Image (cartoon, rainbow, N blue to C red):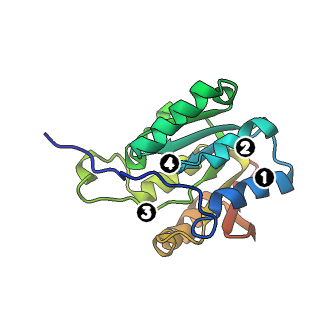
Amino acid sequence: MARLELWKDPWPLDVRQCPCDVHFTSYLKEQGLAGQTIFHFGTGDHHHVGLQAPASDNAVIGITATEPEYRSYIRLVTENPHLGKYYKVLYSDIYQINVRLLPAFDIVTLFHLCEFWSENNAAFAALDDKGVLGALTALVRPGGLVLFYTGSFAYDAASRLIPDWAARTGFTEEPGYETLRIFRKPKA
């Protein structure tokens, strides 16, 4: 029987190695972005973005394909039921995401775009990285944001997708923040 090959180890918060989530929540705070609906690709075992959501009335849907990270999410919302009103986590391979099941978003983070494609999982995929980029950013409301992490080990591959995507969709680049590259969807 075929099985998905998914990441096995949880990702702890290590700002020296991967500061994107901390830079993102700092950006939200500095920009006064509260009450936002956010799709966050890659929760980490630390769930930093989700844990910050209640303080700013943000609603976050995160996605992880790492079983230990999903288990830690379950533990977090069981021990802190208030958090569950603001933060939900999907357990799925990003390439199997069905956007018909998702709402519109004010902000989409694609910090880990191009990091997880696996030829072994290709037969089960609904999308490739270009498809993930197009499908998730199509859910961004007019005037909303898409953010990329320039420190990703796969950023070189992701950055090659961005120019064509931006030209096709009309997203325009805004000034970056720390390690983040930021694009805004046109306001209708």
Choose between 118 and 5: the one closer to the eye. Answer: 5
Q: Is residue 129 left or right of residue 183?
A: left
Upstream in sequence: badge 4 or badge 3: 3
Distance between the Cα atoms at labels 2 and 4?
26 Å
- Residue 109 drawn at (x, y percent): 61, 53
The amino acid pointed to by label 2 is Gln
Mark number, residue 135: 4
Query: Residue 158 location in percent, x, y?
Result: 50, 68
- The percent position of residue 84, horizontal first and vertical second, equals 63, 28
Residue 73: name its quadrant: top right
Category of crowding for the residue at label 4, using alpha-carbon neighbours closer than 10 angstroms: few (below 14), some (14–19), many (at least 20): some
Q: CA distance from mark 1 to mark 2?
A: 10 Å
Residue that badge 1 annotates: 28
How far apart marks 4 and 3 lie (CA) works out to 17 Å
Q: Residue shown at 23%/56% (left/top)?
A: 120
Could you tell me if residue 102 is visible in this image?
A: no
